[in-house]
Image: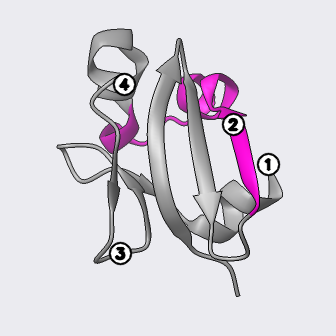
Amino acid sequence: MFWVVDAKYVKDYQVWIRFNDNTEKIIDLKDKVLSDQRKIFLPLRNPDYFKKVIFNPESDTIEWPNGADIAPETLYQM
């Protein structure tokens, strides 16, 4: 089982992520954000809003102020 232990916004729709196995990745979420039609993901299409991504240690993944998040397992596979 994988979970996020640290994350930072990089640029555009990219986020640097470190997982619990010390794997580090820069993940480009542009396709995910622009193709996901769920209402909670719509604000993330705005690059200024996307930049507000944070690592939430309580949920072990990344999230945005509106509650949008992406499962750590999904991120690890990207």
x, y percent for residue 44 = 37, 27
Label 4 vs label 2, nearer the camera: 2
- Please tell me in which quadrant of the rendered image residue 61 appears: bottom left
Q: Which residues are magenta?
A: 23-41
**Observer-nearest of 13 and 44:** 13
**Residues under numbered marks 2 and 1 in contact, where contact means CB atoms less than 8 Å apart:** yes
Q: Could you tell which of marks 3 and 1 lies nearer the N-terminus? A: 3
Say whether marks 4 and 2 touch (CB < 8 Å): no
Mark 3, residue position: 59
What residue is shown at x 81% (from left), y 59% (from top)?
Answer: 77
Residue at coordinates 42% horizontally, 18% vertically from top-left? 45
- Numbered tag placed on residue 50 in the rendering: 4
List x then y, in percent, for residue 31. Answer: 68, 25
Q: Which mark is residue 78?
A: 1
First of labels 1, 4 by sequence position: 4
Earlier sequence position, callout 2 versus callout 1 = 2
Q: Residue furthest bottom?
A: 1
Identified at 69% across, 36% down, the residue is 27
Pick the front one: 57 or 32 = 57
Q: Amino acid under label 1?
A: Met
Secondary structure of residue under mark 2? strand
Quarter of the rendering containing residue 55:
bottom left
- Residue 66 sits inside the magenta stretch: no
Instruction: Estimate the spatial distance between the alpha carbons at disc 4 and disc 2, rounded to whole Å.
Output: 13 Å
Separation (CA) of disc 1 from disc 4: 18 Å
Looking at the image, the residue that sits furthest to the front is: 22
Give yes or no for contact between labels 3 and 4 (Cβ–Cβ under 8 Å): no
N-terminal of the pair, mark 3 or mark 4, is 4
Q: Which mark is residue 27?
A: 2
Q: CA distance from mark 2 to mark 3?
A: 19 Å
